[in-house]
Amino acid sequence: GAPPRPSEAAAPLRRPGAVPSRAELDPLTMTDEMEAIDEATQYRRKIDHTLARFSAAHDEGNAEEAKRRERRDRLSPASLIESTRTALQRVVTPTPSPEEEVDAEQTRLQEKKARKIERSVRFGRIAAAVVAGLVFLGIGGAWGAQTYFDAKFTQISALDENSSDIQDADAQANDENFLMVGSDTRDGASAEEGVGTADSNPGARSDTVMVAHIPADRQRVVVTSFPRDLEIARPDCQRWDPAQSKTTDEKVAGQKIAKLNTAYAVGGPPCITKVIQQITGLRINHFVGIDFNGFKAMVDAVHGVTIHNEIPIDDTTLGKVLLETGDVTISGDQALNFVRARHVKGDPTSDYGRIKRQQEFIGALLKKVMSSDVVLDPGKLSDFITAFANATFGDNLGVKQMMTLAQSMKGLDQSKITFLTVPTVGLPNNRGNEVLVRSKAQALFDALRNNTSLPDPNAPIPVSEQGQPTSTSKSKTSTSKSTTSRKTSTTG
């Protein structure tokens, strides 16, 4: 017979633990390429090779993907920045000691406090600017209502806005013209105050007469002063009773030649308003009167006003009013004499030096009242309101009207606020009166009514209007002319 197949042969003896020979293995679980195999075995072998290649390829792919992912993460911008920052921190910022940690905490607290202070300062500045810009509205608000402040004014009757003396009425639509009169009535004054009493100086006189003109576009303010000794033709007026702040039934006949201050002394606010409208052609739509006693109280209420005094003021009647020069803070008593002094040594005339001081003082007082030192101080503000209201009387006068004046003068720059003196010859005539240069006055008030450029205040006076002054001293005339116009800022 045929020899037995290897698989059928008796298994040889082997040592325990020895690996079986290939001939002893099941051909279904193991194939050997060195052996002759059948077709089925070859097929299985191909499958094994294919699976092995797929497995190897899969493992290799996973390994490559892991490497790429690691490299990508390592080279990403965020990773680079973070690693760089960490490295720099290790170099530049070593581990702080306990003392350094305390210092760092203190620095953070100081920076936080500085930021808080900065915010507070910024808020304070904003608040100050808002309040200063709305000064009189703010005053009304501080008292809770505008009507409270309005009620403090003494209302009188002074205006005549339909007067035939008003010129260019259409051109003056929406203009504001404040006639401001400083009255030297002594009613209520004591002998110790040094201004006289009602017994020694009965009646009332206009020591200061000014018109503040604000055109409809609010682009400039022109304040024109009128000498108290300006020669006028006084019209018929009703007698004024200063004690009652009203006119009486008595009619005072007009006077062809008179001083300007007699218009107020005889007929009070209505009469002086009529005269100023005749001279200027302006529609006076606000009257503001302030007496001496209240003027002094207003200055003291804001704890003094700083003025710039160029030369010592030594008055032959009032004495040594102010000897200091430069920037000087003056009290109410000093301020009163500062604007009243009419016989100062060195003044070219009794009026022009005083007018210049009055104009300067108005600017200084306005600057002080508009400052945060007053506006943001409830005590000073309250005292000023009381003093101002107690001393002030007027027609068409209240919070809104005074706010218009204050905001206009506060918000404009130096070049747009002009203080002038009505054009005069410069020296008194044989009657002791100041003589108006009518051609120059006409040009000035035409410019105000029509809101055109102001004429040159230094233009020569026509020969026909030079008048007959008591002195022909050219030096004095030149000096007095130089005081008739100046520009100054009230905002500082």
Image: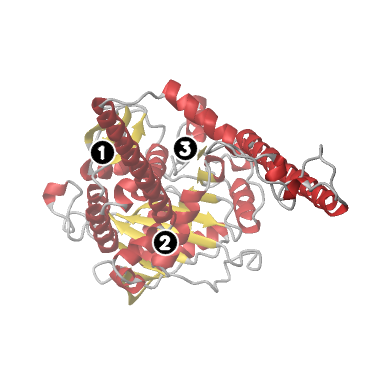
What's the distance in space between the residues labelled 3 and 2, CA to CA? 35 Å
- Pointer 1: what residue? 330
Instruction: Sort mark 2 into few (<14), some (14-19) or many (20+) by Cα contacts within 10 Å.
Output: some
Percent x, y of residue 303: 23, 45
Q: What amino acid type should be assigned to the residue bearing mark 3?
A: Leu
Q: Secondary structure at mark 1?
A: strand
Q: How many marks?
A: 3
Please state which of the two labelled residues, at mark 3 or mark 1, is closer to the viewer. Answer: 1
Instruction: Sort mark 3 into few (<14), some (14-19) or many (20+) by Cα contacts within 10 Å.
Output: many
Q: What amino acid type should be assigned to the residue bearing mark 2?
A: Met
Residue 460 visible somewhere in the drawing = no
- Pointer 3: what residue? 427
Quadrant holding the C terminus: top left
Percent x, y of residue 265: 33, 60
Percent x, y of residue 305: 30, 42
Q: Which one is nearer the viewer's eye here, 132 or 316?
A: 132
Q: Residue furthest front?
A: 1
- Pointer 2: what residue? 402
Label 1 or label 2, whichever comes before in sequence order: 1
Please state which of the two labelled residues, at mark 3 or mark 2, is closer to the viewer. Answer: 2
Q: Give the side of residue 394 with respect to residue 329, left or right.
A: right
Q: Secondary structure at mark 2?
A: helix
User: In the displayed structure, would residue 11 be above or below residue 215?
Assistant: above
Q: Secondary structure at mark 3?
A: loop
Label 3 or label 1, whichever comes before in sequence order: 1
What's the distance in space between the residues labelled 1 and 2, CA to CA? 25 Å
Label 3 or label 2, whichever comes before in sequence order: 2
Which residue is painted at 34% across and 74% down in the image? 147
